[in-house]
Every structure is written in C-alpha cells, then in structure tokens.
Image (spheres, grey):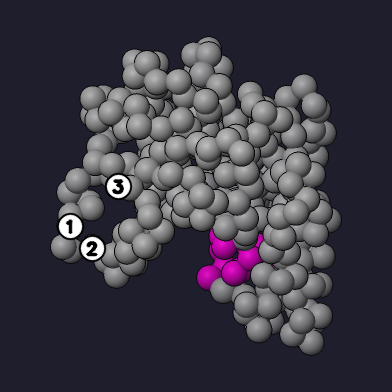
Amino acid sequence: MAAKSRILVIGPTGYIGKHIVLASARHGHPTFALVRETAAAAVDLTPAQAKLFEDLEAAGVTLVHGDLYDHASLVRAVNQVDVVISTVGFSQLKDQTKIIDAIKDSGADIKRFLPSEFGVDVDRGHFVEPVKSMLDIKVQIRRAVEASGIPYTFVVSNCFAGYFLPTLAQAEATGLPTDKVIILGDGNVKAMFVDEDDVGTYTLRAVDDPRTLNKVLYMKPPANILSHNELVSLWEKKVGKTFERVYVSEEEILKKIQVSPVTLSLSYAIYHSVFINGDHTSIEIEPSFGVEASELYPDVKYISVDEYLNHYL
C-alpha cells in the first residue's frame, strides 16, 4: 500500500480548519499545521484555543511556524508535504494567491491543492449581495489555481450541520424553536446538511483519490437532503410538539438583506441562496467537472440529520 500523503493545513484553528486537520491525523496522514509562532506559544489563549492545541499535539500533528504573509515560511512548510489544504477565513480568501505562489516557488511535487471552499458551488450558484462579492473571490481563486497548473480539488460541503441545525435553520434564531418557526420561502426547497467531522472525513478520503483530481467534490449524503418543512417536521416528531410555521417571502428576505446590519445581511443572503434558489441541491453533477462524496465512499458512516438532532433531546 502506498504511503499516506503528507498534508499541510493552512488555517488549522478556524471553524472548519480544526475538523480538517484532526481528520487528517485521524486518517493516518503525517499532518502539519501552519500556525504563527506567537499563537502557538501564547499564554493568554482562551480555554477553547488551548484545548485545540492540546488536541493537535495529542493527535500527533506537527506545528509548523509560519504565516500566510511570510513567503519564505510558506515555502518551507510546503516543502515538507505532498498536499496543501487551505481553510482560511473570508478575510484571507483573496490572499490564497500567496499559497499558489509558494507552491510554485517551492519546487515541491505537490500532488493536490485544496483551496478554502467548504460551502456552496461558487461557479454554479446564484447569489445576491453582499455575499456575491465575497464568493466571487472564491471564483477568482479557482481560476488562479486552474491557471497555475497545480493539481486541485474544490470541496463543496454545503450547509455545516453545526451552523444550521442548532437553530433549525432559522436565520435570526439563537436556539431551537419553542413555539413558532420562521421559514424562508415556501419551505419546500431542498437543502443539504453535513456534519463538520464528516466534511473532514470526506475531504481526507479525496486527497489521494485520482477520481477527485481536478474535480469539484460535492458532499450530498442522501439522508441529509431535506427541505425546511421536512426538517421542522422531523424535529416536531422528536419532541412531540407542533410549531406554528411563519413563512417569509423572497421579497421580504431581499428587503431584510438591504436594511439589516452587515453580519445579518450576509446570513440572509446565504439563506437566500440555500432556501430560495436551492443552490445546494439544484446542480446536476456532471462527470466532466464533479463527483459526489457519498457515492465515492459508501463505507463512510456519516451522521444523518436525524441522528444529529438527537443531541438536543
């Protein structure tokens, strides 16, 4: 059996980054995490940050000191690995060109680069502002990766379960419903929910798979394709209670996007893509550009929405 690829994760302490880096170690890859030296050595870490560094150490992850904006440190890090995975946040998306430059300048035989995606298919979705401009940056990075000639995989994981399910996919809610549920649109548009650890598992299964080379990897496990109405009904069945369903029209959503504070406006724009345009489930995956994770890896026992919701009972 061929040796597992050595993997560098850039952005390992971010929301999805920590799931990716731990999945890499869990799947037996020699795993390297790029961290600023000051961050790794800081004594004023939050308990959550300290716990994460402890988990990385316990998992056998090698911390590599470097920075996205320090070219020499990026090149040194890239030279230690076979695969580079970026999980940087929105504010650094455009600066992933620095990773591309480091890969090219390193002279390393990088077998795969996975830029920071982990959401909707930015080439085939239909977005409104303000999220459109942000996702256009991901489109630009896709084109830059393709133009560089670096082998790649673009990961489309759709809705993070940990972001959407704790509120039953309500845009402004802070918890599960107690009496009524706010539903955007008619509630019948299908969405796709994936547990973050499963995102890590599917991503790591793909890095050495020739079937995902220069392709979009979509995560659409069948049990997790639900409309908002179906999601609410599932929860109602679990708790033995019926909630009032309040439906918000597309016109009202677009108005909320215009008048809401930036963070909430972004959320509504994302929800518009998911629950109005159906961007997670309306795309036909063609073999010319994409593959689907649960079909490629049927042995992965992913967490279903049904099972996930049991955590809240």
Q: Which mark is residue 63?
A: 3
| Residue, disc 1 | 42
Q: Residue 241 in the image: state x and y as whole percent.
A: 78, 85
Q: How many callouts does the rendering have?
A: 3
What whole-number distance in Å separates the C-alpha atoms at marks 3 and 1?
Answer: 14 Å
Q: Earlier in the sequence, mark 2 or mark 3?
A: 2
Please state which of residues 202 and 93 is positioned toward the viewer in this rendering.
202
Q: Nearer the viewer, mark 2 or mark 3?
A: 3
Instruction: For mark 2, give the secondary structure.
Output: loop
Q: Residue 164 in the image: state x and y as whole percent.
A: 61, 61
Dot 2 amino acid type: Leu
Q: Is residue 86 above or below residue 110?
A: below
Residue contact between numbered discs 1 and 2, judged by CB atoms under 8 Å: yes
> Is 57 positioned to the left or the right of 285 in the image?
left
| Residue, disc 2 | 45
Q: Residue 172 in the image: state x and y as whole percent.
A: 56, 63
Residue shown at 67% from the left, 28% from the top? 210
Task: Give the residues in magenta.
Answer: 162-174
Q: Which mark is residue 133?
A: none
Q: Nearer the viewer, mark 3 or mark 1?
A: 3
Task: Indicate yes or no whether the magenta region holds residue 101.
Answer: no
Q: Earlier in the sequence, mark 3 or mark 1?
A: 1
Label 3 neighbourhood size at 10 Å, few (<14), some (14-19), many (20+)?
A: many
> Is 133 positioned to the left or the right of 209 in the image?
left
Q: Residue 277 in the image: state x and y as whole percent.
A: 74, 42
Residue shown at 56% from the left, 26% from the top? 152
Dot 1 amino acid type: Ala
* The C terminus, quarter of image: bottom right
